[in-house]
Amino acid sequence: MRQRLAELEADRERALRHVSHELKTPLTALKEGVSLLREEVPGPLEEAQREVVDILQHNVRGLQEQIESLLTLNAAAFEARRLQLAPVKPRKLLAGVVQRRELHSQARQLKVVVEASEQAVTLDAEKMAVVLDNLLSNAIDFSPDNGEIRLVVTRADGLCRFECIDQGPGIAEEDRQRIFDPFVQGQRVAPAPRQGSGVGLSIVRELVRAMGGRVYLVPQESGAHFCVEIPDEQ
């Protein structure tokens, strides 16, 4: 039964990769065609025609992002099955993630506070870095200018908890049950324009599950509070 399920999952992944790549070819042609129209290569555009071309260009970009996100999510699901566990110091791990997002946070005048010890925990550092990067990027996008984001690591009851807490608008109650589903953007809007099509939290869930843990949203009145729990193998 387990082997059959693995075969079905492999078939699903192959089909998704095939469909995604097959879609990219005509999409590239469509993108190039719209670009030629936008540059008026076939001839001058009237104002109404230019508006239609702008709409086409916007939708083509959106479709391209969705296809690329599907491929990214599929790759994450594949990589999740290949763990490389090693002792890692949480503070050092978080410091690296914060540094990579430094320009992103500075552009919004955000303060990122790290609360973690130097005591090592056994995990897949590369995958956990991807998890934390997605959570931090999300927090930066939704935080108000001059706000604060807290990254906290605690250990208790045989678990290591990584928490990301921001001061943004939080997650609407009707979105909380599906916030980790692919392409769910949520109803509350980020204060600044943001990129992405809504697979970041799905990737987080895939990778956390692969490490034998869970990720969940902590209910609170304002701001988003995500908690990742993984087994603490000391």
Image (cartoon, grey):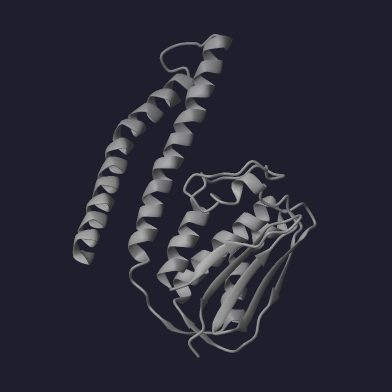
Q: Position of residue 30 (x, y in %)?
A: 37, 27
The x and y percentages for residue 159 are: 55, 81
Going by the picture, which residue comes out furthest to the right? 146
Q: What residue do we see at 54% from left, 65% from top?
A: 215
Location of residue 153 with respect to 65 vertically, above or below:
below
Name the foreground residue: 38 vs 73: 73
Q: Is residue 83 left or right of residue 111?
A: left
The residue at 63%/69% (across/down) is: 163
Q: Quadrant of the N terminus?
A: bottom left
Q: Residue at x 60, y 44 (%)?
A: 186
Residue 92 on image: x %, y %:
59, 80
Position of residue 126 in the picture relative to residue 2 (left or right): right
Residue 66: image quadrant is: top left
Closest to the observer: 218 or 143?
A: 218
Q: Of 19 and 227, which appears nearest the observer?
A: 227
Q: How many marks?
A: 0
Compared with residue 233, is residue 214 higher up or lower down, i.e. above or below?
above
* Farthest-out residue, front: 1
Going 62% across and 75% down the picture, which residue do you hit? 95
The residue closer to the viewer here, 166 or 125, is 166
Residue 210 in the image: state x and y as whole percent: 40, 69
